[in-house]
Amino acid sequence: MTGITVNPAAGRIGAEIEGVDISRPLDAEQIRTIQQALDEWKVVIFRNQRLDHATQTAFGRQFGELTYGHPHHEPPKDAPEIYTIQHRRFEKQLGGDATRKQRSYAYAGNNGWHSDLTPFINPPAGAILRAEVLPNYGGDTQYTNLVAAYEGLSEPFKKFVDTLRAEHRYGANWSGMPQPSVAGFQKRVDENSLVAHHPIVRVHPHTGEKALFVNPIYTDHIVGMSPIESRLILGYLFDEIARPEYTVRFRWAPGSVIFWDNRATCHIPPRDLDHLDVERVLHRVTLVGEVPVGPDGRESEAIEGPRLGSEPVFTSTFFDRRDRAAKETVS
Ligand SMILES: [Fe+2]
């Protein structure tokens, strides 16, 4: 009826949606079709779209309330819901060598998979990312299906993890080693702690499916366990969510737009560009999420920090304004 077709892109996650111009207002049936595809395939890609900040924001609003761009990065002028991902810009603001070194340390002991902003009590429900500038090669984004990762566990282990809760912390980074800090950014993160306790198994509000809601960027430890117990179990779960059979890899092209369910997926940003002098610019809008609920019906708990919503989360000056003139040092 809608003219929309949904073509699966991999066995367990990801679909390509054709037959819709997402720069225009959608009717109720189109919205339902896209939402159903997202619930089933967890991440969908639209090709050959023409979006700008305003139409991307309008597209996102049809699926829920949008957050302020990002808690720690300044949005573009006149587009408060946009978060621009551009490593060359981050490096220019903070110092290239320091930023690259910090990234290499941050990823040294973990595989980089994450759901966005899980240290909030209400992590985003989803996000929509559009490409503006792309390198000629490299820079793909991968997604993994956290429902499939849960379903792949043995029955006794499922029962065990169903009872667990974990602490998610902004800046946790499962690297197991001290990290150099990029001065201004680290100060901002330190001054604005974000910590939440989430069930390790999260029940999806639309589908009722159980997802393995942990990731090595933000999940710090399992609540109530000894450090060695926590480390061994989380290490195993991080391996499980990264199994190739649960993943899909998308190659960006001009006009590509990816929409993912942040409750049921992790993603991994490209790490194959750091040594290349190339530009890559993408823009994200983010859907406000609800408080996660575990299999026992218990909600997550806020430990530090506010909810994520449409207003700026922190009132202190943005690091990139404050430190624009500062020359970077690694402490
Ligand atoms: Fe992300």
Image (tube, rainbow, N blue to C red):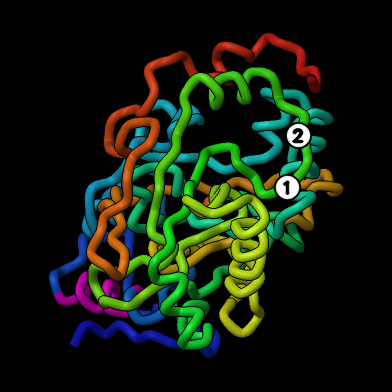
Say whether marks 1 and 2 touch (CB < 8 Å).
Answer: yes
Question: Which residue is pictured at 30% across the width and 37% down the height?
Answer: 307
Q: Amino acid at mark 2?
A: Gln
Q: Is residue 219 above or below residue 261?
A: above
The picture places residue 141, in percent across and down from the top left corner, at: 61, 63
Can you tell me whether the CB of the residue at mark 2 lies under 8 Å from the nearest atom of ligand 1?
no
327 lies left or right of 168: right
Question: Which residue is pictured at 61% across the width and 55% down the height?
Answer: 216
Q: Which picture quadrant has residue 293?
A: bottom left
Q: Is residue 321 magenta?
A: no
Element type where label 2 sits in the image = loop
The picture places residue 176, in percent across and down from the top left corner, at: 74, 46
Element type where label 1 sits in the image = loop
Question: Which residue is pictured at 36% across the width and 66% down the height?
Answer: 202
Image quadrant in which the C terminus is located: top right
Range of magenta residues: 29-38
Res. 131 in view: no
Image quadrant in which the N terminus is located: bottom left
Q: Amino acid at mark 1?
A: Ser
Q: Is residue 37 magenta?
A: yes
Choose between 182 and 197: the one closer to the eye: 197
Q: Identify the residue position indicated by label 1 in the image.
A: 175
Can you tell me whether the CB of the residue at mark 1 lies under 8 Å from the nearest atom of ligand 1?
no
Res. 206 in view: yes
Helix, strand or loop for the magenta stretch, by majority: helix
Choose between 283 and 156: the one closer to the eye: 156
Instruction: Tell me, for residue 179, which label it has, or none.
Output: 2
Question: Which residue is pictured at 48% across the width and 70% down the height?
Answer: 47
Kindly report the distance in space between the C-alpha atoms of the residues bearing marks 1 and 2. 8 Å
The picture places residue 319, in percent across and down from the top left corner, at: 56, 19
Residue with the most extreme left position: 28
Query: How many numbered discs, if any?
Result: 2
